[in-house]
Amino acid sequence: MSLSSIARLTGAAALVGLSAMAAQAQTSGEPIKIGAIVSATGAGAGLGIPERNGLLLAEKDINAKGGVKGRPIKIIIEDDASNPDTALSKANDLIFGQKVVALLGPSLTASTVAVGGVTHPNKIPQIAFTGIGPAVERERKCVAHVLPPQRLNAQALLEYAKSIKATKVGVLHDAGYGNVVMAELRPLADKYGVKLVAVEKFEIGATDTTTQAAKVKAAQPEAVFIIATSATPFRNVKQIQIAQPVIAAIGSSSYEYVNAMGPAADNIAIPEFVVGEDPLPHQKAFVDLYKQTYNSTPKNYEAAAWDAAHIIATALTKAGADATGEKLCEAMKAPYTGVLANYNFSADDMTGIPISSFVFSKIVGGKYTRTPFRVAQ
Amino acid sequence: MTLSLVLQAIFAGVTNGIVYAFVGMGLSAIFKGSRVINAMQGEFAVIGAMTTVLLLTKSGWPYPAAIAGGVLAGALVGAFIEVAFVRYMAKKNASEDSFLLLTIGLALTLSASILFFIGRDGHLLPPIGGEGVLLVLDAVIQFHALWLIAIGIGATLLLRAFCHRTTVGLSMMAASIDADGAATTGINVGRMRTYTFILGGLLGALGGILVTPLISVDYTLGLNLTLKGFAAAVLGGLTNPLGAAVGGITLGLVESLAIIGISSSYKDVVAFSVLIIIMILMPNGILGRAGRRGG
């Protein structure tokens, strides 16, 4: 290579560098690396893809607002293919290979528990896109969660039942997510004075739950809870003409499921957090930016990932980019008003979301509408 | 347990049973004609249903034409798989396990391609006969489900007539019972095998299209259908497509009656215990003996 061509290349490199700096306006210096693991493929892709969108948007937003004390952040996103083993090896690579300062994700509980086994002993702050899972997670004081524990989801269902004065409730739930929520729902129901008149289970991926729905109908409930991650039970409930109000757990709140429900989605009530069609005032900026960027309406998982990225950026700003994991952890443990909810990571369940953070939506003509009902703290 | 609940369970059982039967019949038609256990039979259903959805919503075809297009797509994919893979492997005397591996691979590939090209969303088709329902003693059955049952029974009878009355059908049967013997009488055994794949693809696609107004079709549906269809086919006697129909309805009914009789938590335990007992008492399946005689 001749000297002149080297000079030309250097000049070009300088130009590229300059234009990159112009695009990022206020940030400069080595980017702070943050790792993220999502389930972009496999069974959890319905969570992982929205989460990835939320992360990318948050990275752009944080850097546009000056990054962490002027230094840009770089979120390195990996896909665990909905597999805890893969999540673990990706976490090892991010922590020890890429030397990230913190880890966001994963999308699924099993993967979160697996990854916590690395982040916890190595004192790497982690913010998982799950609700707190098995007992071991309570000891992991630096693994925060941006989604509510299943107990809170169960409570939200019962709060809504109470608001419509339903005391006899039938439940249709799947054998995975549904089972976990159900375990929390049973003891809580008594406290709310709700009698579970029929509890029917179906396997994950069941193509028909008509008979279970018929059993629920025969028990003559005043409302029906559906705790599932598929559209099938919702369609079956309408097919056998259950006219009572249907309340769905947050797991089935996505456009994908609502589309698959077709006309059966109408009038279903869902306790959740983000209604993109009618956001709460503090959610509006995020929803507008999301719509502008992706040309679609965000829901809960996009907001959860967005919050996680902002929480870690806030902690980094407070503790300094070179702070140890422990210091960063301490900085994280403060109340934080997010788009999804109000968090407090010093709470026992590592999330601190109050029930008052829930909003209750209803599906009307395939679209979410926010109802005025909220639970007072 | 009330009468209307039992009736509701029977309606659901028969409806599901017919869906299992469609997948099972295709599976057993292919097994009978080629000794290939087709682990991608449920994928034919997804291909048929997805093609119909796309023709109907994206290309604006009238519904009957879109259904015909979907069925044709299933048949074409069936033919393609035989010509492109099975024929070549059969020439090399591939073992039954290799064929099984081939179809498992194809199932995963097709499912991933649907995810990549069409997306994650579930799709629905409009019900045949409208959104209406028939009310019998408080039990509900959709008009579409009645159509599904009628078409299912019709398809089973047609299949039987095809195998017993038409020259092509009889040649296919002959080629499957004794390939060498059939070849000596001038039957093109290779072509007959292509026909069985076309038949399997056609039945699978038709089943998929008919189920899509009831449950939404997405890229993950195939494996579920294959498993149920396989259970139906084995229960009825894997070598007899008619047996798969009987097996499918048996499976559907046992499943739904187990839910009301015992508990939905033990549905699969009860259903599969019954299946195991049937298989112990009738190791060749309910209609397995008839299958040996040619169905």
Image (cartoon, helix red, strand yellow):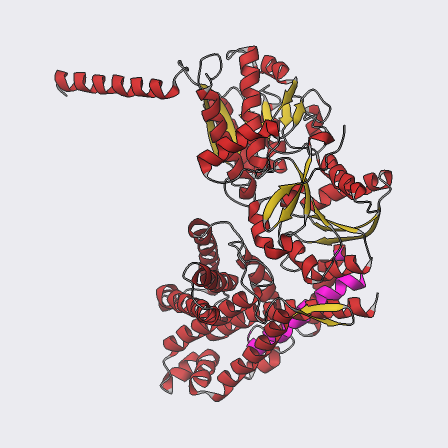
Q: Is A46 within the magenta? A: no
Give the answer, above or below, for where B116 lies relative to B195: above
The residue lying at 49 percent from left, 23 percent from top is A34
In the image: residue A8, left or right of residue A102: left
Task: State the image quarter where residue B233 is shown.
Answer: bottom right
Give the answer, above or below, for where A352 lies relative to A302: above
The residue lying at 65 percent from left, 60 percent from top is A208
In the image: residue A50, left or right of residue A143: left
Q: Which residues are magenta?
A: B239-264
In the image: residue A41, left or right of residue B269: left
Q: Name the quadrant of the N terminus of chain A.
A: top left
Helix, strand or loop: magenta stretch: helix
In the image: residue A105, left or right of residue A244: left
Q: Position of residue A205 (x, y in %)?
A: 62, 53
Q: Position of residue A119 (x, y in %)?
A: 59, 24
Tell which of A11 and B232 is nearer to you.
A11
Task: State the image quarter where residue B243 is shown.
Answer: bottom right
Tell which of B130 and A5 is nearer to you.
B130
Tell which of B256 and B237 is nearer to you.
B256
Task: State the image quarter where residue B91 is shown.
Answer: bottom left
